[in-house]
Structure formats: structure tokens, C-alpha cells
Amino acid sequence: MTYTFDFGAVLDRAPELLWGSLGTLGLALAGMLLALVIGILGVVARTSKSEITRTLVIVFVEVVRNTPFLVQIFFIYFALPLMGIRLNPTVTAIIALGINGGAYAIEIIRGGVESVSRGQIEAGFALGLHKADVFRLIVLKPALRAIYPSLTSQFIMLTLTTSVCTSIAAYELTSAAQRIESDTFRSFEVYFTVTAIYLVISTLMMGLFALISRHYFNYPTR
Amino acid sequence: MGPIGENEFFFLMQGLKWTVLLAIVGFIGGGIFGILIALLRTSKTKVARRITAGYIGVFQGTPLLMQLFVVYYGVALLGIEVNAWIAVAIAFTLHASAFLGEIWRGSIEAVPKGQTEAANALGLHYVSRMKDVILPQALKISMPATIGFLVQLIKGTSLAAIVGFIELTRAGQIISNQTYRPLLVFGIVGAIYFIICWPLSHAGSGLEKRMAKAAR
């Protein structure tokens, strides 16, 4: 059996792939922002005085990190309408991505905050710095730098995870690929092309994150 | 709405069997190729380092779902008659080999350089140096990350559902469609994954903490 590749059938649908890629970037960006918000709120809640709040955060993190994203997105997809919330699949996907990424963000940010030693904070006060300056210079800046590599690689993973959102028919690259596949029957060509697009997206993101890091984190931490 | 009875539960357990089998095959196959990748990635030959770096980069830079699709349809193009199970198992093996290769590369490099130098001074050749000196230490260093990846892999097998392979998540989807109780069904499915993954995660992070304490 010989097979003739026909990438032309896929390239004819280039505009759809482009829009799909933008959909993927949009999902990823919105998911990251929501994850960051959940991450920060979660870290604050984890230091709360109420034991119930602290336990809830820990349970949330453990449940999300130890179950597949596909099961989470199905659960949320069916749970929201039962709660009387009707959203389109793309918004549902953003919520699922935010919740998933948020659980990982909580752990990463918590690690960064805990990495700042008490002695440094006390030293800051001893040098006569204001409370705001101590927070900004001694807690926030080193913590940000400490969490930046793990947080950004988590964001890239979140971007790749957006492909799973095709299972609830959210608007993104993989669902565009599946539409093109069912029209052209060029399964291998479609998925090969789309895989290459994902590789370009994640490589560009890695480059961008590295560039930002070089500009903003070029100060010594210790 | 239909009830979730013995039959439904049995069907889920059938799915669970395939989830576990896929994870085991992916982990063992990926482990064997992963060691090879890690050794090539840390070898003296520049070409070998470059090629394996590219291999790892491609698998870490693309979604697992796309890897499944490409391998699934790619294997069919090779003209070999394989069933869905083998195609999916190949995909997970390749995926795991790249990630484990990268984890183990890091562990091999984390073994103090003095160990290699001492092995050289003792006149050990490459195979013995790796097998008897470096790899046993690297394996220990890599344990937390390796267990962490195993959890990722178990969760990742759920994506085989999108390709149409009936494992735990797909079994859940089918039952959910039959009984119209999606929350209950996906709640149970999620709980099953949790019961498998949480002890592993816990063991991994416990090991990490103990090793961090020992290193201090």
C-alpha cells in the first residue's frame, strides 16, 4: 500500500487554522489570568486563621492535581447548567483551565513566598525600611523571581492543555483540526500540521517568557 | 434518568483495567526508551545530544492529545494492521520516553562530577561507570520527579478517550450518556483517578522532603 500525502487539502483551510490558533491563544491567556487570580487568592486563603478555609484550599489543590483535566472539564461542563449558569463552551473551557491552572499556581506561589526567610524581613526592618518597601523589595521581588520559571512553564503546559477543550467543542485549534479532518479525511496531514503549529506557539511563548525574565529579573536575589 | 447499578460499575471497572494497563505499558516502555534518551542526551557525541534534545523538545512542546492523533493515524499510514490499543500504547510510550529521558538527564547531571572522575581513575569503562556508579545514584535522585511523571501519565491516559479508546474516562462518558447522571458518573470517575494518583503524589512529595532534609 502506498499513501500519497496531500497537505494541499489542509493548507486550503489555512484561515480556519489561523482563527483556531488565535482561539487557542485567547483560551490560554484567559485561563492563565484566571489561574493567577485563583493562585494568589488561594495562597492568601491558605494562611487564613480559619482552619476550615485552609483545609478547603488544600483539598481543592489535591483534588485538581490528582484527577485528569478531561474529567474536570466534563464535570464543570455538566455542573454549571445544573447550578443555573448557562455559558457557551469557550467560557466554560476558560473556567476549567483557570481552575486547573489555579491549583498548580497555588502550590508554586506558596513555595515562592515561603522561600523568603524571616531573617531577611527582620533585617529590612532593622535597616529602617517602611513596611511597603519591605514587602516590595524583600518579599515580592525575590519571590516573583523564584516562582517565575515554574509558573511560566506551568503556563506553557496550560496552553498545550487547551487542546483538550475540543471535547466540549470550545473554539480553538484542535476543534478546528477535527472539523477539517471530518471534511477532508486527511487525518494524518491535519494533525501533523496542527502539531507543528502548537510547537511554534509553545516555542514562541518560551522565547517571550525568557525575554521578559532577562529584562525584569536581572537583579541579584541574595 | 437511569440508575447506576452493578452493570454500570462493572463497566467502569473494565475501563479502569485499560487505564491501568495503558499507564503501565507507557511507563515501562517509556522507561526503557527513556534511559536510552537520557544516556544519549548526556553522551559525548554532539549529534546524539542534539537529536535527543530535539526529540524531547517536540514532545514537551506539543499537546499529548496531538501526539496521540499523529501516532494513531501515522501508524495506520505505515501500512501495518494494528488495533487501536497498540497505536495508543505506542503513543504513550513515545511520550513517556521523552519526559522520562529529560527527568533522568537532569538526575545524571546532578550526580557529583567527582563520581565520574573517581570511576575513571579506577579504570572503569563507560558501561560499568554508568551501570554501577552513576545510574544507581541518578535513579535515587530522580525518584520524586519520576513518580510525579507517573501521576501525569495516569491522568494523561484519559485523553485516549478522545481518540475513541474505551478506558476509564470513555467508559464514564458512555455511562453518563446512558443514565443522564453526568455529575454522579464523572464524580465517581474522578474519585477513582484520585484514589490511584493521590497516594503516588503523596509518596513522591514525601520522598522529596526527606531527600531535601538529608541533603542539608
Image (tube, coloured by chain):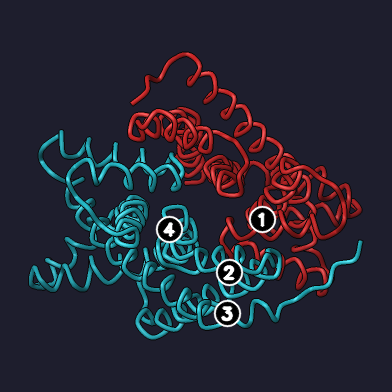
Q: Horizontally, is A128 left or right of B134 in the view?
A: left
- The residue that label 1 is drawn on is B112
* Position of A12 relative to A2 (above/below): below
In the image, B59 versus A78, the foreground residue is A78
- The residue that label 2 is drawn on is A180
Q: Horizontally, is B182 left or right of A173 in the view?
A: left
Q: Which part of the image, by quadrant, shows the N terminus of chain B?
A: top left
Q: Position of residue B119 (x, y in %)?
A: 82, 52
Identified by mark 1, the residue type is Pro
Secondary structure under tag 1 reads loop
Indicate the colour of chain B: red
Is the residue marked by circle 4 packed among few (<14), some (14-19), or many (20+) residues within 10 Å? some
The answer to whether dots 2 and 4 both sit on one chain is yes
Secondary structure under tag 4 reads loop
Identify the residue at the far front of this view: A183
- The residue that label 3 is drawn on is A13
- Residue drawn at the location 37% of the way across and 65% of the way down: A146
Subunit under mark 4: A
Secondary structure under tag 2 reads helix
